[in-house]
Amino acid sequence: MNMTVDEIVENFELLDDWDERYQYIIDLGKKLPRLPEDKKVESALVPGCISRVWLHSHVEPDGTLRFEADSDAIIVRGLVSIVLALHNGQTAADILALDLSELFDRLNLGNQLSANRRNGFVSMLGTVRAFAESQAR
């Protein structure tokens, strides 16, 4: 899946109610490529998520950052898709300059997700940001 955050936001805005948006997040999760089982290791688990989320990161030769992730919960896989769309192919400086609160507002996620899912989403974003910070040094 190679969608941009702007495309995701545009699609969100076309949907009339939260039930449709929730289904859209689930659909994003269904399109997310699965991680191979050998990458679903303890060291790749994102802390702070109720569901299990595995996140791998690396730096491409051109200096951009790449992430791949998976979850054992379908709605969380959709949230993972949003995180990947936001960060894949960005430089560490680009990631560190992102205004994530603005994205939350544009998608209205803060009001619609359960506290546990919201905390997990924030944990995924924090893990990505920590990797970007480690590469920006």
Image (cartoon, rainbow, N blue to C red):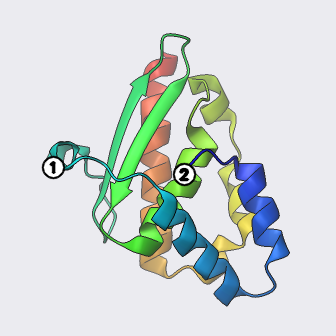
Badge 1 local density, few (<14 within 10 Å), some, or many (20+)?
A: few
Helix, strand or loop for disc 1: helix
Q: Which residue is mark 2?
A: 83
What numbered label is drawn on residue 14?
A: none
Residue 102, horizontal then vertical, whole percent: 75, 56
Q: Is residue 124 above or below residue 20?
A: above
Dot 1 amino acid type: Glu
User: What's the residue at 70%, 46% (across, down)?
Assistant: 4
User: With 40 as the anchor, is 111 left or right in this view?
Assistant: right
Residue 49, horizontal then vertical, whole percent: 34, 65
Q: Is residue 27 above or below residue 121?
A: below
> Is residue 102 visible in the rendered structure shown here?
no
Q: Which residue is mark 1?
A: 42
Q: Is residue 43 above or below residue 118?
A: above
> Camera-side residue: 9 or 108?
9
Helix, strand or loop for disc 2: helix
